[in-house]
Image (cartoon, rainbow, N blue to C red):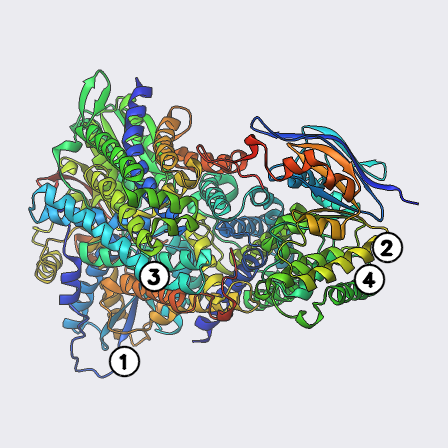
Amino acid sequence: MTGIALRSENLSRSFGGVQAVAGVSLSLPEGQVTALVGPNGAGKTTTFNLITGNLRADSGTAEIRGKPIMGLKPWQVARLGVARSYQDLRLFTHMTVRENVLAATETSSWFWQPGGRRAQQQREHRAESAMEATGLTALADARAVDLAYAERKFLSMARILAAEADIWLLDEPASGLDLSSRIRFGTLLKDAQARGVAICLIEHNLDVVVELSNRIAFLDQGKVLAEGDPQTILKDPALAAIYFGDRPQEAA
Amino acid sequence: MTAFLINLATLAAISGILASTLNFIVGYAGIFSVAHAVFFGLGAYGGAQVALLLVPNPFLACLVAAVIAGGLSLCLALPALRVRGEYFVAASLGLQMVAATLFAELKPLTGGIGGLVGIPRPEILGTIVPVLPLALAALALILWATARLQRGTFGRTLQSIRDADSAAESLGKNVNAAKTLAVVFACAGAGVAGALYALHLSFINVESFTLDQSIQIMAMVIIGGAGTLWGPLVGAVLLLSLPAVISFIPFIPPTEVGAVQQIIYGTAMTLLMIFRPAGLLGDMSKGKSTA
Amino acid sequence: MLFLQLLLNGLQTGAIYALTAAGFALIFGATKIFHVAHGTAFTIAGYVFLFAWGAGWPSWLGVLASIAAAMVFGIVMERLVYRPIQRHEGSFFTVFVAAFGVSIVVQNIIGMIAGRGFATVDTPLSFSAEILPEIFVAPMLWISLATAGVLFVALTLFLTRHPAGVALRALAQNPDLIRTYGLSSNGLSVLAFAIGSALAAPAAIVTAMTTGLNEAIGHHVMLISIAATIVGGIGSLRGAALAGMMLGIAESLALTVVDTQWAEAVSFLVLFGFIIFRPAGIFGVTQTR
Amino acid sequence: MIGRRGALATGLALPFIRPAFAQTAEPYVMGSLFPMSGPNAEFGEAFTRGAQVAIAHINADNMLRRPVRLQSEDSQALPQPSVIGMNKLINIDRASWVLSSWTATAKAIAPIGDRAKTIMVNGGGVGPDLSGLSPYFWNVIALAHLEVQAIVPFLVNQRNVKRVALIYVDDPLGDGILGQLREQLPRHGASLVGSYSVPRAAQQFGSVVARVRQSRPDAIYIASFGAQQAQIVKGLRDNGVTQVICSFSGFGLDGIRTLPEAEGALFTTQKLDFESGDPITKRFATDYQARFGQAPVTYHANYYNAAYLFGVLGRQVEQAGGEVNGETMRAAMLATRKFNLVGGEGEFDELGNMLTQLQVNEIRGQRVIAVG
């Protein structure tokens, strides 16, 4: 039933001699939550940046449903249905919650959006339901800077929801959330999964990984060491040793 | 008295256009340009040449001015796409200084420091019209357009780019295109102001398009309140009429007139910024609003 | 021969630019305040020296008075203008406009007190002698180069050895680091303004002796300082000083290829080019996200 | 030493005094539009002083039925402030006589004065483009081309100059002087060996001077103004150029006269002999000295003349029973043409340019001496 939404082959990138990503091959199937795990500096966020076009890969390819995306600009990749969140959120701080979400529905950079009033109403409707789903409706007119931490995280999710993308790249979306928020976040993911969205998330807390994801890709030193279902991967003692930093060169 | 006020109102309307258009890129797109006078100048030279060589039709002059200023504003858009904040301020500073030298040296087009004289007064259908109604109409049009754009989706796009350009881009917004559009729109507006200025004064030279002028326009925006619709207009009227009002103060020794006026002017500027840092119409409660 | 002569002239101009630019860069690096009234500190320092000289003070006293005046101005700006503004809203241009207002006021007050127009300190030190055929050099060249050199060594020592200096550098890189030093960033920002403004004084004195002063002279100096700070790479004192020196030399050597009226535009063309092609400056590191 | 005056002291010590008059009528307002702040304020101050003395004389002599008051506006030497100031002078202060100077100011206000039929008198700017701006725009100073024609023969014949280099600001004035030097020098068997244009705001001249030196001139002509010309002079002398420096009337400022480096500089001005027996000149020189504590120079005299002319023409109009305004005074000027002013008789042409004789001056021991 599932196709592969996004596939990367051998993505590589080095910074001044340091190989940050060394040949990452990754597939994100539709309707699955893939967790990208690995120690700090494993190249997780860099992988995201290579896929979304924020960074240029030294070598390797990536494609969305067979369409190559290497060399495209971030906004072009986004228009192919990729939405991402950032670890530092990057909200539109001085705009209200509603404006933040509405902005995610408007992709044209022209003086006005195409489609006239009808499309405008549809976008507003999408924004309202995204706020509804993330529990931000009551805060619609608050400015992003004035929100509490968890609310900000949900705002960043609301933007992604409203963007109606079918590939989500989420950078530590659940970190710092309390239990009830995490449950609500889980529901968001389940709903999206049910709609066939391919989700990839970076997460450090392994409990959360188990709770939210059904696949794991284990990254270390810029390579995917293992890929598979959470139980098998997390039980592998070699991977655990790497993850918990037992190796001397990881001590820093 | 009326003629004095009409002249002042005309200049205020022209400054209002300049401040509003600059506010569009400063207050909404976060592009801090100190080169607005360059595009004011390009429009003024363009409009003046149309009136001198072809016909003194104000609409044609404004159109040509807008096209020239808007077209050449890509010089400003180029650094705006690459760098932000202080770097961009410095880039626009460089552009302003180089452009002022060019204005002074390209004598066949600009008349150099001697300037262009005898620019005919604007005519519509063979009758001479004063510049004030034209300037007010242009100001109203530009305020209307900026208000529409600022409140609409384009304004939202610009603000999102100002607050977090990478996030805006990853939501599918073509950041470079939006920034370029904003710059072209604002600079074309400055060009229109330039054409009106040339028609109003009948004389222009490079001294009206220097860094000092750019800073003055910037001060109008900041003092009025960046990112507000009416703030820049208030700032323009204030900064333009303040020296005129000061000049009514009696009993200043004639040889010290300039210094005393400038001291009052500078003091007012500084005090306003200390006590109303968000500008006269800016929202004090907003905290750090830009940059 | 012309090339060598222009190079020497460029060095003298460059030394002045380097000192003021370093001051600007120090202030900007440590406080993130775009101190456009830096040129005003320069003007004040120059005129104070001029008055001291005219009143017959010994020159060392004049130099001290001039440095003190520049420092006081810097500190007053920090305490009375920048800090109240930043308390509310640190908007970049709010600071810019406020500082610009101050520079207008000071320029006109100086015009009223000292008289308008040209003023110079008349000294044989600025008078050139022919040291080689066709090469004219004034003692001021050596004095200004030596001053710039000594001050840079002193400044580098201060910034690398003295705890307050180290803290200043840290502040430039990361304001949060400061808490670990147990120094208040308020005190440090006053220190940055004091030292940065003081650096303008020697440059102003050299200018008073060579090209002479007028009340509007600070304007140009400030523009060059901004350009040098950017070209050198924000946060890099070494870069700002080197870039100031480079802009001075470029302005002068440009005369071998272009007509004289374009010399000044050359500096700003260099600036514009740098921002387009190497925004991080000479010593800056390109930031990756 | 400090080469300057205590401007503040004199400015404040001499507050605006309006003599008490028998007449109770509203005073006539004479406007002035000079750069009173910014880099050229030194000129505005000098111009204003000349006019102040003239107005004091007009009032003291009861030349007119109403007293005259000077309304000073700051033009900043920029077009926009000039236009605002001019509109204020015409429409609010009802001035029918405005003293002005500076290319940008003159060109910006000429259309306004023309429409309002207000006389504008220039006694400072010498750019050739200031001639014929409007029937109401007059010059009481010889324009630059005449100044060049006066100094070239002197340089060649008296000082044996064969090669001249020009440092100039590329504005109509500098351009005019460049053209005249190109034309006049070969005519007298000399040549222009180099011309170096500098931006108006330039302050460092060491490198330009190096280029000048390369051209091996016998004399250097400077066509700049304000603080810049002093900086150029100092730059030349400091960088080993010992040849004679010459210039136009822009050198008639205290900042130059008292500059040690300017010793021996030659410049042209209108013919003015303050020691002569001419009573008008003598009175001006004496009263100026008494009021400002120093000897007057040409600029002071020019604006004295520019202001005093209002008294002369105004009296003619009043005596003929007319109303004193721009139109009547222009008619009076065209009817009379010749006036006794400071420095002798001045004669106007059709365009309103006063033709005067010129003299060459030399700065010796901080004094200006006529040498030819």
Q: CA distance from mark 4 to mark 2?
A: 26 Å
Residue drawn at the location 69% of the way across and 64% of the way down: A180
Residue drawn at the location 27% of the way across and 44% of the way down: C200
| Residue type, numbered disc 4 | Ala
Q: Which residue is mark 2?
A: A194
Which of pointers 4 and 2 lies earlier in the amino acid sequence? 4
Label 1: state its secondary structure. Answer: loop
Q: Which residue is mark 3?
A: C81
Residue A43 x %, y % = 64, 36
Label 2: state its secondary structure. Answer: helix
* Mark 1 neighbour density, 10 Å: few (under 14) some (14–19) many (20 or more): few
Residue D266 x %, y % = 18, 37
Instruction: State the image quarter where residue B155 is shown.
Output: bottom right
Residue D339 visible: no
Disc 1 sits on a residue from what chain? Answer: D
Disc 3 sits on a residue from what chain? Answer: C
Outermost residue toward the bottom? D24
| Residue type, numbered disc 2 | Ala
Q: Which residue is mark 1?
A: D26
| Residue type, numbered disc 1 | Glu
Disc 2 or disc 1, which is closer to the eye?
2
Q: CA distance from mark 2 to mark 3?
A: 58 Å
Q: CA distance from mark 2 to mark 1?
A: 91 Å
Residue drawn at the location 27% of the way across and 27% of the way down: D164
Answer left or right for D366 relative to D110.
Answer: left
Label 3: state its secondary structure. Answer: helix
Answer left or right for B145 relative to D366.
Answer: right
